[in-house]
Amino acid sequence: MKFSINRDEIYNALQKVVNVIPQRSTFMMTQNVLLFTEDNLLKIVGTDLEITLLSWASASITEEGAVAIPGRLIHDIIRELPNSELQFEVDEQFRMKVTSDFGRYKISGVNPVEFPQRPDLGENLKQVALENSIFKKLIENSMFACSTDELRAALTGVYFDITTGKVEAIATDSHRLAKMSYTDESLPEIEISAIIPVRSLNFVVRNLDVEGSSTIYFGNKHALFEMPDAQIFARLIEESFVDYERVIPQETPYEMLVDTDTFYASVKRVSLFSNPLTSQVILHIFPQYIELHAEDIDYGGEAQERISCEFNGDDFLIAFNSRYLQDILRHISTPKLQLRFVRPDYAVLANPVDMPEGEDQLMLLMPVRLNTE
């Protein structure tokens, strides 16, 4: 195997792949990355057996071949080199020699056949293409609500429910729920239901370009995200998602309209004085304003603020975990926010006001028991 490549080109490709490499693993081969040449490209693969990332860069290929080498080592070597043309050569014992303007560096590799194979998606693939901006909104506005409880595996990922003309991304940890939807009549006539782990989606968001589009292929056990300069294979969570629609209130007699940024800033300030164990912040809602209150009895801290709102009730008292409430508010992108209530011990719905055409967002937050003692 012999090729030459620009330092920045190979470094950019390695940067995408190296983060997939696990910090610790009982399967040492996953500490390596696979380098191989194909179609005048140098292709690089990294995997932790749950996520497999393939990236590539243009190279001048003198001799085709493949090798598996320590991923972080080759990444760190390339990182420290200035931009110039680099020469790579691999011998029959899979020893790699890197030559730069400054010197030579040798790395011991292993037979590439020992490297894990890329996932086989199987036959009868289903696919959907989305603009990167839409795709990013779907992921970011849902995955924050995923659970971290590995015993509830179905809740540790985002549930994608795709039907003709519509894509929905839903996540919940049982305390909160986030649902982001995108409607477009030009989307293909397909039906897909799949749960994608949140860690895989983090890699997807990290590698999405600001502009352009990407395609998702759904197989039996894996999903493939295809981008202009990378492919990400993600193992699907093979469990049934919860019946989330059951917890969404169908009728909400009380509604509040408030400025998103003002409300978010006030919650952040007041919550600094909440009890660290409960993070409770109390909202006392009146027709034209909200009083926000938090108190830490143990240390004597207390805060209270008043901000304007529009409310169709007379007097409503409810409490939330301030961390969860801030998560909800942080993912509202419109100037105005609507909160809908049933009663103080029932799920609250939050949604942006005046979203772009084709987009819809709904979030649910469970209140906490009022502790006013």
Image: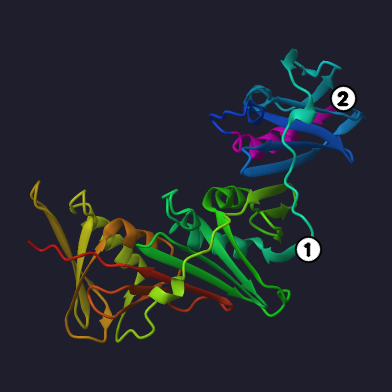
Return the residue nearer the eye: 167 or 137. Answer: 167
Mark 2 Cα shell of 10 Å, populated few (<14), some (14-19), many (≥20): some
Question: Quick check: 320 above or below 110?
Answer: below
Residue 71, position as x, y percentages in the image: 66, 28
Instruction: Report which quarter residue 225 is drawn in.
Output: bottom right
Query: Can the viewer see residue 332 in this picture?
Result: no
Q: Is residue 155 left or right of residue 337?
A: right
Mark 1: secondary structure: loop
Mark seen at residue 1: 2
Residue 324 colored in magenta in the image: no
Q: Residue at x 80, y 19 (%)?
A: 94
Return the residue nearer the eye: 66 or 304. Answer: 66
CA separation in Å, label 1 and label 2: 36 Å
Q: Amino acid at mark 1?
A: Asn
Residue 126, position as x, y percentages in the image: 73, 65
Mark 1 Cα shell of 10 Å, populated few (<14), some (14-19), many (≥20): few
Mark seen at residue 283: none
Instruction: Report which quarter residue 216 is drawn in.
Output: bottom right
Q: Amino acid at mark 2?
A: Met
* Residue that carries the numbered disc 1 in the rendered image: 124
Return the residue nearer the eye: 119 or 264. Answer: 119
Q: Is residue 326 left or right of residue 220?
A: left
Colouring of the image? rainbow
Question: Quick check: 337 above or below 270?
Answer: below
Per the rendered image, the range of residues in magenta is 1-21
